[in-house]
Image (cartoon, grey):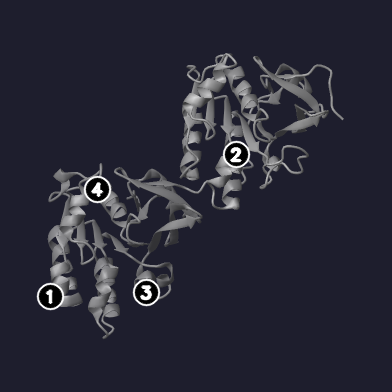
Amino acid sequence: MNDRMTTGSDALDVVLGGGLPRDAIVLVMGAPGSGKTIFAQQWVFSNATPERPALYLATVSEPLEKVLRYGQTLSFFDPTAVGRSVWYEDLGGTLRDHGLPGVLERMRELIRVRQPAMIVIDSFKAMHPYAGRSGAFRPFLHDLAGMLSAFPATSLWVGEYQEDEIQRSPEFAVADAIIALKSVHSAERTSRALQVHKLRGGGFLAGTHSYRLSDDGITVYPRLADPADVREYELRGERVPSGIQALDGMLEDGYWSGASTLVSGPTGVGKTLMGLQFVFSAVNQGEHAIIATMQEDPSQLERTASQFGWSVKSDNLTLMYRSPVDLNVDQWVYELLNMIETTGASRVLLDSLTDLQAATSDEMRFREYLYSLLHRSSRQGTSLMMTYELPQLFGVSKLSDVAVSHMADNVVLLQYRDVTRVMSRTLTVLKTRATGHESRVREFRITADGIMLVPGQATE
C-alpha cells in the first residue's frame, strides 16, 4: 500500500514529497483565515470513500453548521458524500459538559462505529482551555495519541497556533508532520506562504511556498529554485535572428537558439520595440511565440504593434498580460512555464524584469526565479528576451540592481546620446556567450520598419 495520501493538490503533494504520510498525526497551524479548514476539507473529500471514510470533528472554534455552510461553497465539496463517506460530528457540547475525558470517550465511540481512515479535529488548540490549571492536557494528549496509534487512521489536527508555540505546546512533539500556513507582509503587499516544519520518515521541499485560496481550494506554487543539473542536453547549433538585420551582423548572424538576452535601457529608448521585433520575426516564420507583459495591456500593445504592421492577435502569438499590482510572482512563473510547454513557443518576450523584481519581496527569491526560468528555457530550446528599465538617461553605470546580466547569455544596452541638443539613441552589444560580437556603440533610429541602425556610424 502507498504510504502517502494526496492532499488534493498535486503541487502540495510535491512539496510534501508525495503527500501526507498514512497513519500519522499531521498538525496544520495558522492564523484565522489562513485556509486551515479549507486544507482539511480538501484532503477529506479527495480521499474519503465509503470503505475508508473520514470523520470530521468540530470542537468550539467554529460551529459545525458554519463549517458545513462554507464548505458547500467549495467546488470539491460533495453533498452526496456527507453521511456516506464523510461524517461530521460536533464535539462542542461534549467538551463543555464533560471536558477532555468526555471528548476522549466520545471519540473512542465514534471511531468504533465509523471505522474511519481519516480523522480531522478542528480546532485542536481550542481544547486547551478545558484542561484548566491541573495540567490535564498532557495526559489527554498522551491517551489520544495512544488511541490513534492503535487504530489505522491518519489524523489532521487544525489549530490557530503561532510560530513560537512549536517549541512550547506538547502536541507539536507528538505530531509526525507540521505544516504552517501564514501571511507574509512586504510594504503594501500581503501574500500567503506555506512551510513544512517537520515530516517524519520522508523528505520535503524546504523553504516557503506561495499559495492561494479559491473556491477550488488551496493552490500551491512550490518554491521555484532549481538545483544545479549537470545532466547533458542537446544545444541546437543554429542562430536565431534578432529581427533587426544590422544587429544580426553585429552578433555573427543572431543569437544562439535557446539563449537568454537582456535588453537594458532607460524609459522610451526602444526596449519593448526590440522585443517585439524579436518575437514577430519568429511569428512571421510560422513559429509560436509568447509576450509576457506587465507594461502594456492588450489594447495598448496592439496599438503599438500596429504602428509597425504587426498584430498581437496573430494566431501564432500568445499574449500573457498580468498587472504588476498584487502580482503573485510564483503563480506568474508557473503560468509562463506551463504556457511555454503547452504552446511549444520558440521565443518569449518578458517585458519587464523591473516589474517582476518589484513584485518580489526578497532579492534572493527573485534570482532563484530568474535562474530557474532561464535554465528551463535553455533546456527546452526556447529563446528568451527580457527588458530591464534603467533609471539613468545618460551615462549608464550599471545594468541592474541584482546582477541579472551575469545570468543572461547576451546583454544589449540601449542609451540616449545628447549631441548639439538633439537626442539620439545608441545600441551596444556588451556580451554574447560562446560567440563573438561587434562591440562598437552604434546609433539607431526608430522607423516605420522598427529599429534601424544608422549605416556605417559609430559613436565615440
Mark 2 falls on what kind of element? helix
Residue 71 is at least partly visible in this image: yes
In the picture, measured across the screen, residue 71 lies left or right of residue 191, that is left
Question: Mark 1 or 3 closer to N-term?
Answer: 1
Query: Neighbour class for label 1 at 10 Å: few (<14), some, many (≥20)?
Result: few
Image depth: mark 2 or mark 4 in front: 2
Label 4, on which residue?
A: 45
Numbered tag placed on residue 353 in the rendering: 2
Numbered tag placed on residue 169 in the rendering: 3
**Residue kind at label 1, given as amino acid type:** Asp
Rounded to the nearest angstrom, the CA distance separating label 4 from label 1 is: 31 Å
| Mark 2 vs 1: CB contact within 8 A | no
Query: Neighbour class for label 2 at 10 Å: few (<14), some, many (≥20)?
Result: many
Instruction: Please determine whether, in this image, residue 11 is positioned above or below residue 264.
Output: below
Image depth: mark 4 or mark 1 in front: 1
Image depth: mark 2 or mark 3 in front: 2
Rounded to the nearest angstrom, the CA distance separating label 2 from label 4 is: 40 Å
Asked whether 91 or 293 is in front, the reply is 293
Query: Neighbour class for label 3 at 10 Å: few (<14), some, many (≥20)?
Result: some
Query: Neighbour class for label 4 at 10 Å: few (<14), some, many (≥20)?
Result: many
Rounded to the nearest angstrom, the CA distance separating label 2 from label 3 is: 44 Å
Numbered tag placed on residue 97 in the rendering: 1
Tell me residue 356's x, y (percent). 55, 42
Rounded to the nearest angstrom, the CA distance separating label 3 from label 4 is: 29 Å
Question: Mark 2 or 4 closer to N-term?
Answer: 4
